[in-house]
Image (cartoon, rainbow, N blue to C red):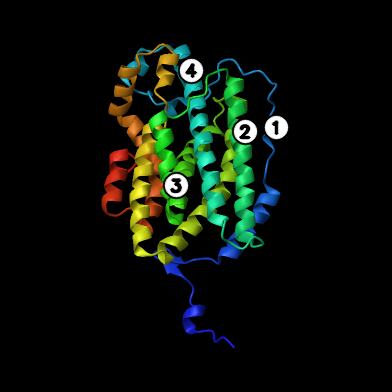
Amino acid sequence: MTTVTERDLTPIRDALGPLRDREQVAARLLESSARHSFDPDRELDWDAPFEEGKWFWPPELVSLYDTPLWRRMSEEQRMELARHEAASLASLGIWFEVILMQLLVRHIYDKPVISDHVRYALTEIADECRHSMMFARMIRKGGTPAYPVPRLYHNLARVLKTVSTTPGSFAATLLGEEILDWMQRLAFPDERVQTLIRGVTRIHVVEEARHVRYAREELRRQMVTAPRWERELTRLSCGEAARVFSVCFVNPEVYGSVGLDRREAVAQVKASGHRREVMRSGAGRLTDFLDDIGVLRGPGRRLWRSSGLLA
């Protein structure tokens, strides 16, 4: 007969307090998924025409906002840039979600198939499939090209997702989800924005809230229980992922698509204090969390600073 020791009964703790039971977290997320999941093909009116004079993205979140170049642009050109940047962000979202689905499948490969933890991971994968199809349909409806990440970073992601540790996978998940989520929470209630775009962002925000909860709880657990080498590798890979993500956030091809000089536009975005503040605000909740649980340390922290997402 196995004796239960006092240590077995002690909950796992980190700097934020005791961790919740993995199965209880998953069960609650499954209940939420049953109540608040959406089919974008049926939920959204894809046949309705776009509304005259409405933006495809809040102007304050457009990369060139409040730069000298922005002030020289006509209102029509600004709105056109917003349309292309919305497509660029949707393209980035699809790229990231395809990576995330692969990481989730790998995470559950050796886990008990009847556990709620695995069931929720499969539910999240189904959500991400719908999101990717929704973003692709949005791009097509908007009449712009898709904007894939540059080939260098597309291939670098192959390496990062192949060597990623389990905690590294969940840290990267949060990186891709939380900054876009912050922006979408500003977009979906904004009546200046196209109704279809608001609908897309509303669905994504509601369903991504569960994904963030799942990833945060698992990352906390991993950063307590993983061996030291894995935690150190996670800090480095997460910092490099932040650098890549910030570079790929808006594809520079969007500037040429609206008749701007690409080199001048990129330089003004890099010099923009407003843009820097937007990106750091979008990452603020995430970087506070990662700092609390010990991810932002050593060389990895320097990579985060070089990304512009951390002051």
Upstream in sequence: badge 4 or badge 1: 1
Q: Secondary structure at mark 2?
A: helix
Circle 2 or circle 4, nearest the eye:
2
Instruction: Relative to 265, say whether 13 is above or below.
Output: below
**Image point (51%, 30%), residue name:** 91
* Type of amino acid under label 1: Asp
The amino acid type found where label 3 is placed reads Thr
Q: Which residue is at a point 54% across and 45% down the rendered structure image?
A: 102
Query: Is 116 displayed left or right of 79 in the figure?
Result: right
First along the sequence among labels 2 and 4? 4
Q: Which element type, helix, strand or loop, lies under badge 1?
A: helix
Neighbour tally class for label 1: few under 14, some 14-19, many 20 plus, Cα within 10 Å: few
Image spot of residue 87 (x, y percent): 51, 25
Disc number placed over residue 162 in the picture, else none: 3
Earlier-in-chain disc, 1 versus 2? 1
Tell me the quadrant of the picture where the N terminus can be found: bottom right
Left-right relation of 52 to 180: right
Question: Mark 4 belongs to which amino acid?
Answer: Met
Q: Which residue corresponds to mark 1?
A: 41
Quarter assignment of residue 190: top right
Q: SS at mark 3?
A: helix
Q: Mark 2 highlights which residue? A: 133
Asked whether the beta carbons under mark 3 and mark 2 sit within 8 Å of each other, the answer is no
Q: CA distance from mark 4 to mark 1?
A: 26 Å
Q: Tell me the distance, in whole angstroms, between the alpha carbons under discs 2 and 4.
A: 24 Å
